[in-house]
Amino acid sequence: MKKTSSIKRLLSAVKGYRLQTILTPIFMIGEVVGECLIPFLMAKFLLGHLEAVNKGIATLNWAHLLLWSGILVLCAIVSLIFGSLAGITAAKAGAGFAKNLRRDLYYSIQNYSFKNIDNFSSASLVTRLTTDVTNVQMAFMMTIRMAVRAPMMMIVSTIFATRIYPKAGLVYLISVPFLLIALGIIMIRAVKIFNKIFKKYDALNNSVQENVKAMRVVKAYVREDYEKQKFFKSAEDVKLSFEKAEKITALNAPAMMLAMHGTTTAILFLCANAGINGAGFNVANLSALVTYSTQLLMSFMMLSMVFVMITIAFASIKRVLEVLEETPTIVSPENAVLEVFDGSVEFENVSFKYSQTAEKFALKTVSLKINAGETVGILGATGSSKTSLISLIPRLYDATEGTVKVGGVNVKDYDLKTLRDAVSVVLQKNELFSGTIYENIRWGDENATDEEVVKACKMACADEFISTFPDGYNTKIEQGGTNVSGGQKQRLCIARAILKKPKILIFDDSTSAVDTKTDALIRLSIKNEIPNTTKIIIAQRVASVQDADKIIILENGEINAIGTHDELLNSNAIYQEVYYSQNKITNKGVN
């Protein structure tokens, strides 16, 4: 049942191109019938004029000859037209199928939660959207065209050959099962290897992706030779696996040749035997049967090509279906809440781990309340699960135990778009996209005016460097934001989050690349301009959070303490250690 539903899911990508998909095999049948009629009609013509042919061309009835010639030419033209139409419709159906399939894959990925994304590497997803879809597309085109033409050619050739000489059809019927059994055995062995090959393709693509993305690090550490060797090893691994697979699929050629030559030999033997025994066999019949044998052999060759492509595609189909059938772990509920009342946040005995099989919880029995409009700082050592904590607020992950509330409502009761529109998160890893600065900032609000964009950038202290660019806000951002510094990238991402006008604004160590003065200016601007927005600031610097209404100290996934700067400085050992270590130059007297 699951296999049937999987096939339906895959074939749903044909939507919009069903007509071309249906017409292609119909046109192929027309081409085959037209092509197979020619030797049959030729045999009938030669049979009717055998005596004239034996006596010489001068004795032929020319009017009759021209009529038959016209019929044969018409058959050839009809076959050509149907074949051309089949090529056009197959190309449209195949390209449309691939387009829809890539769209379905991409849309599926967009609906994934972070937990779903963790199941696939980015290199693997890219391979599935490109190489795997191309393999499936080629197999689809082969199936609706060649996979129809070859069997139809076998069937129609066998029918016409049987009409001419019944024993010839028997030869064809015997050769086909032999061929199918041989191809089936080869396919079963080859598919297992191709399944492994595409996993190695993922590793190869991952190596390239990492190298290109981290090119500056590679060059800074002079690791070019190491990266070359790593890539060569991955490429060599793929090559060896392909060689193994090709050796197996190459066996289909001898199987084809055996079937082809065996059929030809049997037909010639039967024809020769019939002629010797005076069974009324003649040159007209022989000519037609030899033509049908050739057509049958060509069908075998086409079937061989289809077989190789489909064998490769089986592994790709499995990988494509893995993405399509991955069930998003986070979805909007029925009768979802469509409005976030305010920016208050509450954690009630929340525990969280990234996998059900994980032994340890990243967060353990966390309980806290943040009032709407408050500014809250979060401090903790690396690995204390600060990012895990704030990821539960917009449901990037779901709490394993306990309840997370926003605006007094369980986050699981909200429509996802509604909830995430009310929460802006500036993550540790800032990402900018290809396009202008205007286009990047408007990710926060695609309908924002130029004035609103500029205001958001001024609040993020980004306007000061944008105005120095020759093209200002129309400056092109290169892929990944490589033409701006780390601090500039952070400020652009902060401006993007501010433009969203959220009820909750979360900074996940997002000012680490800017100087303390700029950091302070950003915090002051946000405090004054959007006082009713709840601000949650994860930081490594005490200076970034010491003015917060309250500061949360996380240790090993648990809340160690909550209080103001003064309260924690007087009572909390962790906060004292961080504060004094960061201020040891200006607080020598304290130390």
Image (cartoon, rainbow, N blue to C red):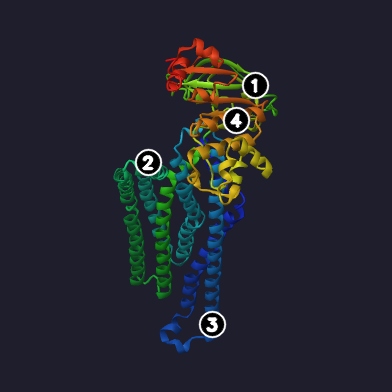
- Separation (CA) of disc 4 from disc 2: 38 Å
Front: mark 4 or 2? 2
| Front of the two marks 3 and 1 | 1
Residue at 70 percent of width and 28 percent of height: 339
Q: Type of residue at label 2? A: Val
Say whether disc 2 or disc 3 marks the residue closer to the N-terminus.
3
Q: Which mark is residue 344?
A: 1
Q: Residues within 10 Å of mark 1 (few under 14, many from 20)?
A: many
**Real-space CA distance between mark 3 and mark 4, rounded to the nearest whole angstrom:** 72 Å
Q: Residue furthest top?
A: 571
Residue placed under numbered mark 3 in the picture: 66
Q: Is residue 568 left or right of residue 311?
A: right
Q: Residue at x 53, y 25 (%)?
A: 544
How far is mark 3 from mark 1, CA to CA? 92 Å
Which comes sooner in the sequence, label 4 or label 2? 2
Q: Please identify, in this view, whether the residue under mark 3 or under mark 4 is nearer the observer.
A: 4
Given this view, does label 2 or label 1 mark the residue nearer the observer? 2
Asked if the residues shown at circle 3 and circle 1 are in contact, with their CB atoms under 8 angstroms apart, the answer is: no
The tag earlier along the polypeptide, 3 or 4, is 3
How packed is label 4: few (under 14 Cα within 10 Å), some, or many (20 or more)?
Answer: some
Q: Position of residue 282 (x, y in %)?
A: 40, 74
- Sort mark 3 into few (<14), some (14-19) or many (20+) by Cα contacts within 10 Å: few
Residue hosting label 4: 331
Q: Nearer the viewer, mark 2 or mark 3?
A: 2
Disc 3 marks which amino acid?
A: Leu
The residue depicted at 43 percent of the width and 63 percent of the height is 166
Q: Nearer the viewer, residue 197 or 557?
A: 557
Mark 2 secondary-structure assignment: helix
Instruction: Pinpoint residue 157: horizontal percent, then vertical percent.
Output: 46, 63
Q: Is residue 464 above or below residue 414?
A: below
Q: Which quadrant of the rendered structure holds the C terminus?
A: top left
